[in-house]
């Protein structure tokens, strides 16, 4: 429905309501009108999916008389069990948001900046697309295709296939910058060091008996939230109720629901994990089947004692190993170089958790099978984070929770039909030359050796024109001036870029820097397909069909891609010639099931993953084993020319270790931004259960209860421990100033025993200065306080190492 039609319909509905209210009310009148309303009612259910996180939960939307009125989970999903999380319902408010961008616009104020009014004026789609295509053509023809930078925020499979991959390639820019390294790449890094897999972890959660969560909150904001909530409900309800222990300096919603909350000192997760491993080995509790055993049954792991790798030679002169590992590699080296001295007492000093408690947790974890040790952003997104995540992940190997029921599993993904465009990709000289240029984000370099992308490098690259100046940004579904730490840098950087195009349904902070706005429909108004992040046993593919006609004058990203290609012409146009979004979707999904089935079910579910099948073929590591010594990383460093004995090489990635220790799960001291003397508290930000990666910011339902644990909304608190507050004379509700080396904000103090005395916690998601009436000027943005730093190996932004001070205003 176009805007004018929509307004007409709304006016008619308003007039009807006014007439109705003037009628005398009686029971018979009511009954009569109900019968009439029923007779007039045109109702249908349409298949769609939620795009508020990478769970992409399949949904069914109830549409009555052309209006979407209700959302529920698709009952055919084995992953979600037909449920959705609270954010799934927000799709309705997102679609009917009164502040949506209603048509293409162009900027008329050439000055860019946070305090500049862009003075946008409406333009036609033809003018908008022609302007963008002409600019891209001009840059391409002048040999500057590589100076066009794509910024990707929330993606879906369709846009990845068309825009992020194909379009960038044939156009000739190597600079497709996704948001992945401000998401969770550090957790993938730690995992890859152990089992060679670069992906989110799949868990057979429904059969797990013990959950040990480090720096993550499965019942608050971890994806895919629906599946986790659903599974957690089941495992807590069953006769042998799962035990959950949450390690976090903040009492998250998950910690509040857990059996135990372990409030360790921030940034010390790796030390705790190493001490748990120490106890498991010294107590003889490791899984002999998966890990292996000593050749001599008398041998054992003794605190402080080195174990010889071999014990003499056999008759053939071959060395006899002291310990024969089955499906793992590197245990003795790990013991000798790290674990023999990583005692609970050593860790107690670092973590603030008593040695007795560490021993108890270690024994429970090793003996309550199957158990799963889980780590998230809090553990990984900081310098040294890869080692903390690696240290947690390998605990699963020690207790044999790998590829077994109730443990880590290795589900396969969706099987799409061959991409029809692959056959027609036309690369010309301009494209080839453009792709030869260095990428501006420094990925896969000596500084970010394993990074698939380094999102946060964008700011410095633009400001320093290193390795070259950026002429144009084509951004979609992202808000990097708000979501990347050290927001000032990005505000300055985006103000410097001569031409910015934002593909977005909302006027985000980043949109105010745009020269051209190309408005998109929300998820319920378009064709789409996707698959969720790997999580459980089932690989599912989902399709979304328009629930209602687009409300405004919008165009979906895939169509924008095709239109731009056509107008740029030449080989770019040729590559996408004849492609139509619906036909493309049909071609990619066609082999899974018939189109009629797609329309009826909205989902395709593959047969479940066969547990144990990955162990049968071996892990994708250089040794084929689960590695306590990261050969994958060793090979990678060698390829990048990084020497683990070279101080400059190690300093560049902020690693203290030298030699083989670099490849072992170990703990390194946190490297914070700001001194403890000047900034006594560490800033820990967290995501609300109602934060849909920014897209829910302007939804009143979400805002009202944004701070779920406090029953509050529409604000941000500076959350501190009462003892900390007392030190600085701060009372509950006081207005306080929080400052760091990088910025300052003011908000209300919230005193809570659930906050470690050394930290200041702050929810992420509020503090918008644009976005819409329900989001604007509500609370503050913790990213305004944070500095730029990284978990360098993976290129992940560091969100948890900025120190702050707090004073009463
Ligand atoms: S927010 Fe994520 S978990 Fe929740 S319904 Fe949407 S896709 Fe599913």
Image (cartoon, rainbow, N blue to C red):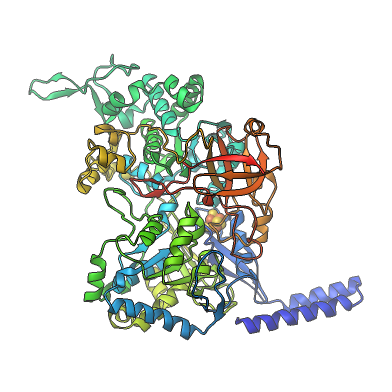
**Measured from the top left, where is residue 618 in percent x and y?**
27, 42
Q: Nearer the viewer, residue 20 or 798?
A: 798
In the displayed image of the protein, which residue is found farthest to the top? Answer: 298
- Can residue 406 be seen here? The reply is no
- Give above or below for 596 relative to 196: below
**Measured from the top left, where is residue 395 in percent x and y?**
39, 33
**Measured from the top left, where is residue 651 in percent x and y?**
30, 40
For the image, the number of numbered tags is 0
- Give above or below for 775 relative to 347: below
- On the rendered image, what quadrant is the C terminus found in? top right
Q: Quadrant of residue 778?
A: bottom right
Q: Seen in the image, is 611 located left or right of residue 330?
A: right
Q: Seen in the image, is 453 located left or right of residue 111?
A: left
Residue found at x 55% / y 65%: 508
Q: Quadrant of residue 175?
A: bottom left
**Measured from the top left, where is residue 198 in percent x and y?**
34, 49
Residue found at x 57% / y 73%: 101
Q: Quadrant of ligand 1?
A: bottom right
- Can residue 321 be seen here? The reply is yes
Q: Nearer the viewer, residue 692 or 101?
A: 101
């Amino acid at each position: 429905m176009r805007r004018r039609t929509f307004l007409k319909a709304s006016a008619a509905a308003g007039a009807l309501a006014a007439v109705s209210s003037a009628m005398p009310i009686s029971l018979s009148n009511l009954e009569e009108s109900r019968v009439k309303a029923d007779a007039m009612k045109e109702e249908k259910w349409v298949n769609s999916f939620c795009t508020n996180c990478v769970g992409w939960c399949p949904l069914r939307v109830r549409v009555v008389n052309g209006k979407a009125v209700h959302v529920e989970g698709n009952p055919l999903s084995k992953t979600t069990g037909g449920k959705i999380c609270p954010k799934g319902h927000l799709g309705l408010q997102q679609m009917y948001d009164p502040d949506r961008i209603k048509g293409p616009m162009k900027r008329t104020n050439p000055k860019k900046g946070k305090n500049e009014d862009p003075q946008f004026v409406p333009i036609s789609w033809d003018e908008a697309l022609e302007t963008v295509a002409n600019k891209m053509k001009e840059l391409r023809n002048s040999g500057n295709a590589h100076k066009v930078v794509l910024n990707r925020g929330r993606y879906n499979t369709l846009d990845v296939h068309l825009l992020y991959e194909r379009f960038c390639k044939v156009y000739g820019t190597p600079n497709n910058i996704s948001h992945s390294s401000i998401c969770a790449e550090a957790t993938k890094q730690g995992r890859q060091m152990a089992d060679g897999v670069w992906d989110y972890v799949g868990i057979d959660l429904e059969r797990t008996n013990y959950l040990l969560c480090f720096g993550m909150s499965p019942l608050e904001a971890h994806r895919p939230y629906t599946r986790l909530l659903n599974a957690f409900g089941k495992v807590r309800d069953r006769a042998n109720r799962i035990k959950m222990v949450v390690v976090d300096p903040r009492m998250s919603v998950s910690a509040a629901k857990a059996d135990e909350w372990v409030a360790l000192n921030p940034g010390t997760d790796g030390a705790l994990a190493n001490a748990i491993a120490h106890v498991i080995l010294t107590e003889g509790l490791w899984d002999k089947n998966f890990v292996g055993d000593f050749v001599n049954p008398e041998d054992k792991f003794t605190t402080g004692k080195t174990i010889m790798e071999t014990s003499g030679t056999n008759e053939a002169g071959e060395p006899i190993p002291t310990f024969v590992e089955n499906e793992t590699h590197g245990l003795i080296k790990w013991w000798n170089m790290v674990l023999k001295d990583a005692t609970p007492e050593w860790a107690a000093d670092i973590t603030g958790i008593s040695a007795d408690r560490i021993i108890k947790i270690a024994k429970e974890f090793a003996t309550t099978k199957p158990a799963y040790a889980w780590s998230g952003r809090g553990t990984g997104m900081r310098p040294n984070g890869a080692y903390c995540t690696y240290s947690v992940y390998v605990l699963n190997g020690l207790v044999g929770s790998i590829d077994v029921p109730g443990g880590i599993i290795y589900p396969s993904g969706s099987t799409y039909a061959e991409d029809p465009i692959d056959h027609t990709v036309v690369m010309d000289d301009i494209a080839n030359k453009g792709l030869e240029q260095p990428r501006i984000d420094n990925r896969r370099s000596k500084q970010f050796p394993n990074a698939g992308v380094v999102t946060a490098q964008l700011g410095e690259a633009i400001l320093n024109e290193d390795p070259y100046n950026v002429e144009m940004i084509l951004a979609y579904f992202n808000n990097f001036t708000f979501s990347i730490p050290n927001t000032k840098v990005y505000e300055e950087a985006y103000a410097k870029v001569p031409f910015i195009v934002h593909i977005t349904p909302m006027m985000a902070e980043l949109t105010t820097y745009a020269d051209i706005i190309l408005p998109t429909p929300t998820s319920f108004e378009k064709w789409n397909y996707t698959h969720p992040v790997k999580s459980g046993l089932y690989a599912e593919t989902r399709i979304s069909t328009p629930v209602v006609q687009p409300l405004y004058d919008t165009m979906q990203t895939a169509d924008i891609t095709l239109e731009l290609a056509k107008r740029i012409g030449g080989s770019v146009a040729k590559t996408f010639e004849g492609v139509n979004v619906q036909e493309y979707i049909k071609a990619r999904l066609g082999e899974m099931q018939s189109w009629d089935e797609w329309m009826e079910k909205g989902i395709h579910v593959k047969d479940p993953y066969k547990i144990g099948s990955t162990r049968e073929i071996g892990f994708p590591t250089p040794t084929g084993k689960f590695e306590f010594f990261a050969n994958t990383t060793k090979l990678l460093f060698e390829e990048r020319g990084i020497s683990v004995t070279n101080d400059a090489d190690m300093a560049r990635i902020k690693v203290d270790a030298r030699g083989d220790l670099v490849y072992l799960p170990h703990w390194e001291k946190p490297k914070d931004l700001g001194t403890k003397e000047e900034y006594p508290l560490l800033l820990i930000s967290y995501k609300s259960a109602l934060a849909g990666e920014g897209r829910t910011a302007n939804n009143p339902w979400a805002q009202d209860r944004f701070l779920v644990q406090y029953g509050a909304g529409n604000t941000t608190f500076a959350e501190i421990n009462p003892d900390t507050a007392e030190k600085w004379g701060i009372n509950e509700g006081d207005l306080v100033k929080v400052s760091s080396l990088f910025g300052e904000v003011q908000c209300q103090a919230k005193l809570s025993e659930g906050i470690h005395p050394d930290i200041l916690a702050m929810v992420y998601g509020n503090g918008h200065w644009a976005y819409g009436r329900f989001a604007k000027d509500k609370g503050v943005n913790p990213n305004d306080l944070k500095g730029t730093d990284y978990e360098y190996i993976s290129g992940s932004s560091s969100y948890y190492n900025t120190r702050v001070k707090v004073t009463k205003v």
